[in-house]
Amino acid sequence: MSDRFNEFMAQLKETHFTLSDYVDFPKVAANVEAISIKLNQLNYLIGQEDMDLAVRRLWDENPKVFSVLDVLIAVRAKDKKKAIDSYGSVHLVSDYFSSPELVIQFLNETGLAEVFRTKQIKNLVDYVFGIEVGLDSNARKNRGGHIMEDFVAKILTRNGLSFEQEVYYTEFPEIVKALGADNKRFDFVIRAQKKTYLIEANFYTGGGSKLNEVARSYSELAPKINAVPGYEFVWITDGIGWESARNKLEEAFAHIPNIYNLTNIVEFIKSIE
């Protein structure tokens, strides 16, 4: 067991991101397209010497164009970001788009007025495309779990295995009896000839208390599932984050016979019956 665990730890990878995972360009393009008409109208402000007059003219033409100004400072309206003014009052960023006077204040205090005036930006559609790339890169952490699942799915598919994803345990009456009221959902289910494999997959690049909790939870879960004839619990996990929770993971090895990583997952595939 010690040799197997040490080999497992030596195989842990620094990342599971591929180049295509860094930026979701179709999503970026869709976000820009959704506000491109307003951005093109706001292009009127670029190069204007009298920004106050330009804002008021544009406001008279279409006040709704200013509703997308928040994205110019990498803020989304749905996030309800706030700012404090010189008088100590706190306002939603979106509150600044309710009058031409407040729009002018927003442009001046953010520095956008000078950026427009000096033409540091040539086209707001192109500028926002860049901002959206940056905002999307900040969302990488949220994509991490799905990336691991996608990675495992590709491996299973490449090896000719049929599987289901995100399956609730309530589909298996025998498992319901074993787990009780636990509303568990498995990342993958493989229904083979002799056994049904209930699989969890995750990847951790950083440490933290969550890893200890995950290891403890699966250590309790696995024996309950494995005690049911015809079912087997499988845990596919990877990432150098486990180095910070090495002891807890080693304890899990004593309770979970089937723990694999992205390197030795082939051993699991060969064992399916």
Image (cartoon, helix red, strand yellow):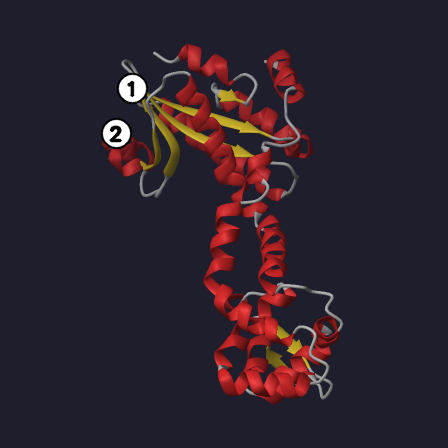
Q: Amino acid at mark 1?
A: Pro
10 or 99, which is in the foreground?
99
Would you name the residue on which mark 2 appears? 174
Q: Quadrant of residue 184?
A: top left
Would you name the residue on which mark 1 appears? 229
Sequence-wise first label, 1 or 2: 2
Which mark is on residue 269?
none
Q: Is residue 220 left or right of residue 136?
A: left
Q: Is residue 249 above or below residue 133?
A: above
Q: Residues within 10 Å of mark 2 (few under 14, many from 20)?
A: some
Residue 242 percent across, percent down from the top left: 64, 31
Residue 132 percent across, percent down from the top left: 58, 56
Q: Is residue 171 left or right of residue 114?
A: left
Residue sitting at x 49%, y 65%: 35
Residue 123 percent across, percent down from the top left: 63, 63
138 or 195, which is in the foreground?
138
57 or 19, which is in the foreground?
57
Q: Residues within 10 Å of mark 1 (few under 14, many from 20)?
A: few
Q: Secondary structure at mark 1?
A: loop
Residue sitting at x 65%, y 88%: 53
Residue 199 visible to an observer of this rendering: yes
Q: Is residue 216 above or below residue 108?
A: above
Q: Is residue 267 left or right of residue 167?
A: right
